Amino acid sequence: MLQRARLASSFLVLGLLGGVGCGPATEEMPVPQEQAPVAPSQDEGRTVTAMATTALSWNDFGKTTVQYVAECVTGPYTHSCYFCGTNPLYSGEYSVSGCTSPSDIQNSCITCDREIREKVAYAEMPDGDVILAEVEHNVAGPEVIEFRLNSGSNVTWWKQVALVGGGDDWRVWNHNGSSWCNWPNASTNNCDTNSQWTDIVQASGTRFIFSKAKFLGIHTEMYSLGGLGDRLTGGDRVTFRWIRD
């Protein structure tokens, strides 16, 4: 990950730490390098459709709920029409069977024996998303806080997290298994980590904005997270994993 941090007001040290990363910009521009491919239609005018975002708290990331699921404990075999027709667990099999009524003894339905089992699952956000958040300490210099976005293997549509505050808009986005970030504009492929000065991240008005591609692929702001100073301190890296959409 390419780290950028201000060591003095008059110069900038650019370090390569394995991978491609981004950081807060200073007045000095980096030495021009070969431009990596940019995602198609990924940063056209940096346009994201604004809407009333849903405010999140840190507790909404990785929040779980208990579900009760009917699971087979035997293989399928023939049941009576009465068995299937009077038990809600087997209403699906009953509806496609040849049974004319629960008292029908000429026909039957085929199903398994089921038990109700308790399962813990991730609670979905309002638009059906599941986003996890993990905070690592002391992985960067104390003057910056890093943020990273990963998408799950089944999440291929465009996703973005932007850190808005201090007059800057630092972003990371994923699309079709690849990732990009800005320094200060969209640049390199495979950049999944960005950073901002610690005092800006911890300021009361700074927030993360989570966006995703909606109908017709329109990039739309969905969620916002404030109160970053309550959880993040200098040297931290917060990784958001968008595992369901």
Image (cartoon, grey):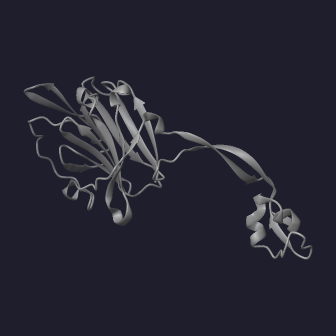
Q: Quadrant of residue 86?
A: bottom right
Residue under the image location 41 percent in, 40 percent down: 56
Q: Point out residue 66 in the picture as x, y percentages from the top left corner.
A: 63, 42
Residue under the image location 77 percent in, 59 percent down: 88
- Which of the pair 41/210 is nearer the observer? 210
Q: Residue furthest right?
A: 105
Judged left or right of residue 71, residue 141 is left
Mark yes or no: residue 224 visible. Answer: yes
Judged left or right of residue 104, residue 239 is left
Q: Point out residue 75 in the picture as x, y percentages from the top left corner.
A: 80, 59
Mark yes or no: residue 80 visible. Answer: no
Judged left or right of residue 18, residue 126 is right
Residue under the image location 35 percent in, 24 percent down: 138
Question: Which quadrant of the rendered structure holds the N terminus?
Answer: top left
Q: Point out residue 20 in the picture as x, y percentages from the top left corner.
A: 27, 42
Q: Quadrant of residue 3?
A: top left
Residue under the image location 90 percent in, 70 percent down: 103
Q: Residue furthest front?
A: 52
Callout count: 0
Q: Is residue 65 above or below residue 90?
A: above
Q: Point out residue 200 in the picture as x, y percentages from the top left corner.
A: 23, 30
Q: Is residue 241 above or below residue 137?
A: below
- Which of the pair 207/73 is nearer the observer? 207
